[in-house]
Amino acid sequence: MKNTPFENIQKRIDSAAQILKLDSHITKLLLTPENIVEKTLEVETSKGKKSFPAYRVQFNNARGPYKGGIRFHHEADLDEVSALAAGMAIKCSVVGIPLGGAKGGVTINPKEYTEADLEQVSRAFAREMAPYLGVDKDIPAPDVYTNGQTMAWMLDEYEKVIGKNEPGMITGKPIVLGGSLGRDTATAQGGVYVLHTYLEKVEGGVKPKKIVIQGLGNAGGVAAEILHKAGHSIIGVSDSTGGVWSDAGFDPALVMKNKEEGKKLGEGLKLNSVTNEELLLLPCDVLVVAALDNQLREDNAGQVKAKIVLELANGPTTPEADKIFESKGIVVIPDVLANAGGVTVSYFEWVQNRQQYYWSLTEVQEKLKVIMVDSLHEVMNYQKKYMSSLRGAAYLLAVHRLYEAMRLRGRK
Ligand code: GLU
């Protein structure tokens, strides 16, 4: 039997704790969610009355209030949400922002419902979860198939419940409601800062690369645009319907335009079609995985031809695939570092909401760059010291910080 996503991340945390020789009582606490909230959302939809299971897993708040997105997905369940919540605690710790880890999920296929239905689901979530949320308690954000509009509905409903304004209770908001400039591009931008810094460190500079990107949502779509503008050759992209590629490279904006217009991805363009599975195996320098978890596994990792895997999605690589990549010398820039730009600008948004003073886009991007570059350097120091993979090093750094916060608080 394969491990579940939550078991996988528990193993990663536990093995970091073993290497660091941490106290076993505190380690046990660090492996366990602090609070699990499970609700059923009863919503009057266009398809009649429906019930949707909803979760908020508050994993760890030793380093700061719980923080993490909410996903709307038909496969969202307690195990997956727990794994993602633990991932948030690790991620915030890797980049050293003063926030803990949490995640939320609603088991729903959002594609089957209208905008008005999704508004009701979002409001029901905020109402049911209101006692557990708050600017100093637990701060949600967007994740898979949720966005600024979702956050706006949730904020509005939450403020109705508490009877006052509290914009800092949720991040990833539209700008007019107190969102931060640069939040929408932050996940991709942060990933590109890390990739470029890594290339500078190991190759002495950033030369144009051939890049394949799985996923054209908020992370992958923006990354395609930034990487193309930076002079790299985008040779393959895909979304949930399939992919397109051309070894000569193409402007991803053309493909995005098709997507926005509701056309087939490569329609009218001279590109070859591929399935999502084939796309991952295309020869390239950098493979950006920006879709869902569990994409690079024991059964396909051996055929991956990329030299670097940049994880903009959460949990795209299984531990078995990690081992295969290590043996083949494929470098994985792990999710907890590569996609941490999103939560980092969420942190900036929260800071701006609290001080009610807003920064320019340049200010946000400069601050983001400092955090991403410094974090990569720190992870690489751990990598050298413990002779581990980048993922192993990121976990060592994060677990060490989380452990110290728990120990100093006297948690045992
Ligand atoms: N959902 C994003 C993530 O997985 C952002 C979380 C946040 O901004 O709190 O990192």
Image: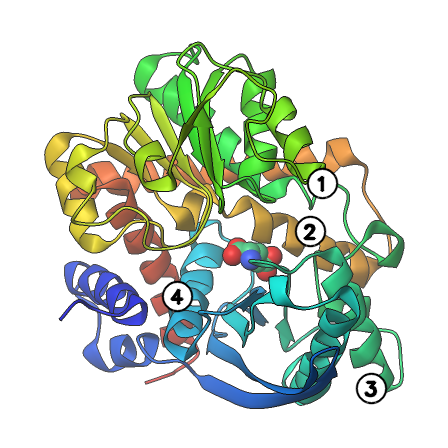
Of the two numbered discs 2 and 1 in the rendering, the one whose residue sits closer to the viewer: 1
Which mark, by number, is residue 99? Answer: none
Question: Distance between the Cα atoms at labels 3 and 2?
Answer: 24 Å
Residue 7 vs residue 90: left or right? left
Task: State which tag comes first along the sequence, 1 or 4.
Answer: 1
Task: Give the secondary structure at mark 3.
Answer: helix
Residue extending farthest left:
327
Q: Position of residue 371 (x, y in %)?
A: 54, 40
Type of amino acid at the residue the image marks with label 4: Leu
Q: Position of residue 271 (x, y in %)?
A: 48, 19
Three-letter amino acid code at disc 3?
Ile
- State how far apart marks 1 and 4 are (Cα): 28 Å
Q: Amino acid at mark 2?
A: Phe
Quickly name the residue at label 1: 182
Of pointers 3 and 2, the one earlier in the residue sequence: 3
Left or right of 409 in this view: 265: right
- Identify residue for label 3: 162
Image point (70%, 38%), residue name: 260
Q: Measure the C-alpha gap from mark 2 to mark 4.
A: 21 Å
Circle 4 crowding by C-alpha within 10 Å: few under 14, some 14–19, many from 20: many
- Few, some or many C-alpha atoms within 10 Å of disc 1 (few <14, some 14-19, many ≥20)? many
Residue named by callout 2: 348
Q: CA distance from mark 2 to mark 1?
A: 10 Å
* Nearer the camera: disc 3 or disc 4: 3
Classify mark 1: helix, strand or loop.
Answer: loop
Question: Which numbered marker is on residue 402?
Answer: 4
Of labels 3 and 2, the one closer to you: 3
412 relative to 252 in the view: left or right: left
Circle 4 — which element?
helix
